[in-house]
Image: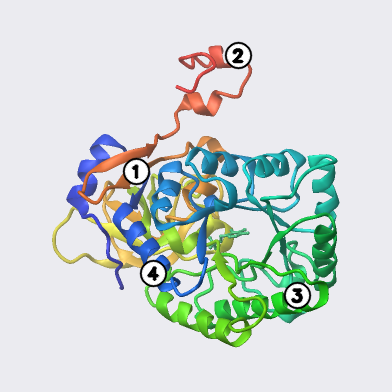
Amino acid sequence: MTTKTLPFDREKLEEIASVWPTPFYIYDRSAIEANARAFAEAFAWNPGYREYFAVKATPNPEIISLFKPFGFGTDCSSLPELELSAAASFAGDRIMFTSNDTPAAEFRRAWELGAVVNLDDISHWSFLLDTLGAGTSFSGHTMCCRYNPGSRAVGNDIIGKPLEAKFGMTENQLFECYAAMKRAGVESFGLHAMVASNELDPGAIAATAEMLFTLAGELYAQTGVRVRFVNIGGGVGIPYRPGDKAIDVRDLSDRIRAAYARRIEGGPLAPLALYMECGRCMTGPYGWLVSRVRHVKRTYRNYIGLDASMSNLMRPGMYGAYHHIEMLRRAAGSPAVDVFDVTGSLCENNDKFAVQRELPVPEPGDFAVVCDAGAHGHAMGFQYNGKLRSAELMLEPDGSVREIRRAETLGDYFATLPAEWRSRLGVPGEGKAG
Ligand SMILES: *Cc1c(COP(=O)(O)O)cnc(C)c1O
């Protein structure tokens, strides 16, 4: 059995859980900051390099704000994500609006904030013009298009094959869209693609960068549009399994730098900024879902039932994703080991954090810490089966712990019902969460 290193021990968790009962999420601030610094330093060779943190990964303003001192922006795809960014004082081209199937109101708000608007489809250009109204000035605004390479690139499991993916435009549409934007007076452009998710091969990510460098050159040759950045999307993977090899940021940077030297340096597009919009690798390894063992059950299989469920972290149930689990036991000595399914309490058989996993045999009350839950974890939470979303906590560099989102209450769960039902349900604070 392999282990992962945790920034807390069992005693510390007991202390935290005496204030915030399990389940809860906890994020390690120092580790998030050290990683952000490593990215900023590794890519400093590129003129204009910027990482746009993908807000959807961990949409908490306290988390988003951690990235500001490192020069990051935010990547948004919805109105609430735009509002969170604005509230955290991101504005103008520090916001990338990469949406799809976009409603008019969201384009309008993104425009108001001066965000870089990244179009998912050629039809969205006329939709945007209709939304913004006649006489809109493009001065000071940057427009971007999302490219879907179709059969030219192979996707991976989570994002799917580009030919089957709903995102982005074909090459012909892309060129046509830039030409139309140029005719309308747009002066500042970028080019975007995202073809991987949770990719652990640095060569594949560098290949996306090279593909976009090349495409930017073709775009310039054919339309005269000179993009000032390429955005290679997010999708940098993290080692969920103990045997997985983490991406070495320096190595990734060196590979992209070599592609830049081949395709851009000394050419008409230089200097060209490199943008990324990573979520997972920015917070994923630095957040944990902490729960306690509620029951140990032995039938045709052995089960460990937790006080967290798939509604707290749905990646394993939805994608069969692996999350490492550390058992922090109260009993001393080396434990017996057995094979378990680790479950939550939803009335759904796919409510499992692990299937047929070898683990130390726990006692009820022991901590089960689900690792690498810092991205696309709490954010994907839901309330099915009357489950409430948990608190989010920040482990500060001095070891103190701060609540950055409270746990939901029954009042939150009932808050959207008509007043009559809220009062029958006896929810305190009519009309308010509470
Ligand atoms: C989800 C998403 C990201 C972030 O992806 P990670 O895998 O978390 O790095 C970035 N850009 C877009 C457009 C996305 O949809």
Q: Is mark 2 on a helix, strand or loop?
A: helix
Q: Which image quadrant shows ligand 1?
A: bottom right
Which of the two marks, 2 or 3, is nearer to us in this view? 3
Which residue type carries mark 4?
Glu
Which residue type carries mark 2?
Ala
List x then y, in percent, for residue 286: 36, 58
Identify the residue under disc 2.
419
Using the numbered discs, state the Cα–Cα distance from disc 4 to disc 2 in whole angstroms: 54 Å
Q: Is mark 1 on a helix, strand or loop?
A: strand
Q: Are marks 2 and 3 in contact (CB under 8 Å)?
A: no
Nearest the eye: 133 or 283: 133
Determine which of the numbered discs, if any, sits on residue 41 in the image.
Answer: 4
Q: Is mark 4 on a helix, strand or loop?
A: helix
Q: Which tag, 4 or 2, sits closer to the chain's start?
A: 4
List x then y, in percent, for residue 307: 39, 44
Q: Is residue 264 above or below residue 431?
A: below
- Quarter holding residue 112: top right
Identify the residue under disc 3.
220
Which of the two marks, 2 or 1, is nearer to us in this view? 1
Using the numbered discs, state the Cα–Cα distance from disc 4 to disc 1 in whole angstroms: 28 Å
Nearest the eye: 67 or 313: 67
Using the numbered discs, state the Cα–Cα distance from disc 3 to disc 4 in whole angstroms: 30 Å
List x then y, in percent, for residue 202: 50, 79
Which residue type carries mark 3?
Tyr
On-image quarter of the C terminus: top left
